[in-house]
Amino acid sequence: MQELPPTVKLVAVSKYHSEEEISEAYEAGQRIFAESRPQEFEKKVRNLPDDIQWHFIGHLQTNKLKMVLPYAGLIHSVDSLHLIQEIDKWGKENGRTVNILLEMHIASEETKQGFYEEEILDIMFDSRKFANVRICGLMGMATNTDDEETVETDFRRISSFFEYLRDLFPEMEEFKELSIGMSGDWRTAIRHNATMVRIGTAIFGERNYSK
Ligand SMILES: *Cc1c(COP(=O)(O)O)cnc(C)c1O
């Protein structure tokens, strides 16, 4: 991870890893960690140092917002208009503005969630309606494959759409993050102008799903 350019933020994906493992990375200087399950997220936030910046990267159900929104510096995985509306509502009720990324569907698998380009455009044009949500950029997951060309194509698509949106909405200064790249494809993501990479396995090793 020493090879990361200084402009790219390293998000350490600690899901399914122990608090001890997180503490070790913290001692080594890492401050941004990401989780994908609300219960695990909340528990780790309570038990670990206050100056950790916690991100949420998993599927977020609207009945779990209370467990996540008070503590999350950024939600990477916002994938429905309903979720945006509910986050905005929570923000109004709690006097907070919540930082989010819009998850864009770029993989060729059917299963990967996320918005299509037209949906993202509609949300961006309507973004003033969501006064308690701050749209900070886009997130994407490439097709899960060893085929470099496919991953290139996925990242090229999200990266150029991101630039298009930045040109179209220059007044949205906070719209500046492109969260792409995981353990297997972060080098490719950086070539396509990632500003954040989400790395789990390459930092912590294989996840222990029995926990
Ligand atoms: C688990 C996860 C990662 C990290 O994956 P690794 O391959 O372990 O680096 C990144 N992004 C999201 C959305 C994830 O769920």
Image (tube, grey):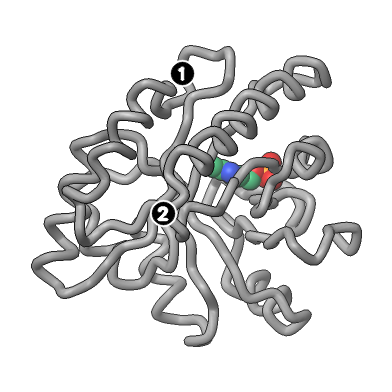
Q: Are marks 2 and 1 in contact (CB under 8 Å)?
A: no
**Type of residue at label 2?**
Met
| Residue 56 seen | no
**Type of residue at label 1?**
Thr
**At numbered mark 1, what does the secondary structure look like: helix, strand or loop?**
loop
Q: Nearer the viewer, residue 23 or 51?
A: 51
Q: Residue at x 44, y 48 (%)?
A: 101
Dividing the picture into quadrants, the one containing residue 89 is bottom left
- Mark 2 or mark 1: which is in front? 2
Q: Residues within 10 Å of mark 2 (few under 14, many from 20)?
A: some
Q: Residue at x 61, y 56 (%)?
A: 13
Please say if 3 is above or below 45: above
> Which label number is shown at residue 164?
none
Across and down, in percent, residue 34 comes to 54, 59
Q: Nearer the viewer, residue 169 or 29?
A: 169
Q: Which residue is mark 1?
A: 111
Q: Which residue is mark 2?
A: 172
Dividing the picture into quadrants, the one containing residue 91 is bottom left
> Could you tell whether 202 is left or right of 20 in the image?
right
